Amino acid sequence: MTATLGAQPLPAATALDLVRSLQPADLADLFPAPLLCVDLTDAHPDDLTALAARRPALVLVGVGPGADASAGRPDAPGAAEALDVLLPEVLRPGDDVPAAVAALDRAVADHPEAAVALVGLLRMAPRLEPLDGLVAESLAYSTLLAGGDFARWLAARGPRPHRDADRPLLRRRDGDRLILTFNRPEARNAFDTFTRDALVAALREASADATLTEVALTANGPSFGAGGDLSQFGTAGDLARAHLVRTGASAGAEIVRCPHRVVAYLHGACVGAGIEIPAFADRVVAAPDVAIQLPELALGLVPGAGGTVSVTRRIGRRRTAWLVLTRTFLDAPTALRWGLVDTIEDAPES
């Protein structure tokens, strides 16, 4: 695939002039992939701020050393906050920058609607309270479920049988701690509606129990969570109703509301919902074998279990965008360095 125009880094002033001159109808012709790379070398902060202020329907990627020293920190203010992805922030010394740009270009070209929806959500994230962010994410998710990209993925996948579990979530009391254990190891703890409902009910009961001080999230089997159960994708007939169900029965929202300390103990694969939900916890403990991924873009979707809220609060919106757009796997040391997990320890006995 030949790199599109937007994958060729432009000086910040040139990028700003280009976006200012565009009519909405010009976007598709000029940007077959809705991505615009900005060369940060000698970029003036005012140009970057003005570029972001226009809220273009483009994924804005910063390439180069950056215009200020704070650019590498996801929580730091600065002109580079205007960008959706900052390559100096996510790449290691010696990484192939052109290859990273090409990977982003391919991802955005293959899934343009989801990519633009993603960065739009993440641009709002710092200004929204967590519960409001969950509503915004769910609206975008339901919209994309109605899109052609998801329909093509669903048709290519074909029907898939669902694996029922008698007890998808186990509860155990240990003094003033409640231990909740995902218990679908045969399905790698894929997060289905039954698991969701059991988790939401358990968290609501825990919130009302004044004798508790801590709620622990653990999992049986080799994986903490393989993400949403793919057998249930595409089964919602009414997407407006699905949005109401998603926001009314949100495990992430219940963790946010929980008055007790919530600690998540991760191990193995933590994919999609398998990282989005535990990232809401007050403390996240990762085993050394943790492998984290946000794969939803490949389905034409954005994270739908709260990841644009929970992951973003921990690592910043630019690193979250990078994870979703590239579907990169994060190992435990990188997750710790970025702040997605708080410590690395061997997995406890469930």
Image (cartoon, grey):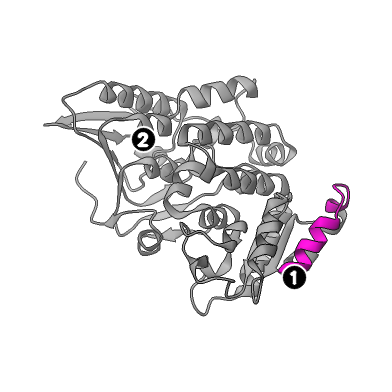
Q: Residues within 10 Å of mark 1 (few under 14, many from 20)?
A: some
Q: Earlier in the sequence, mark 2 or mark 1?
A: 1
Q: Secondary structure at mark 1?
A: loop
- For disc 2, the marked residue is 184
Dot 1 corresponds to which residue? 8
Is residue 173 rendered to the left or right of residue 289? left
Q: Nearer the viewer, mark 2 or mark 1?
A: 1
The location of residue 18, given as percent across then percent down, is: 82, 61
- Name the residue rendered at 65%, 62% in the picture: 61
**What label sits on residue 330 in the rendered view?**
none
Which residue is situated farthest in the left direction here? 175
Q: Residue at x 62, y 46 (%)?
A: 118
Relative to residue 54, is residue 252 depicted above or below?
above
- Quarter of the rendering containing residue 240: top right
| Residue 171 included in the magenta stretch of the image | no
Give the percent coordinates (x, y) of residue 173.
16, 29
Q: Is residue 18 found inside the magenta-colored segment of the image?
A: yes
Q: Which residues are magenta?
A: 10-28
**Mark 1 belongs to which amino acid?**
Gln
Kindly identify the amino acid type of the residue bearing the numbered disc 2: Arg
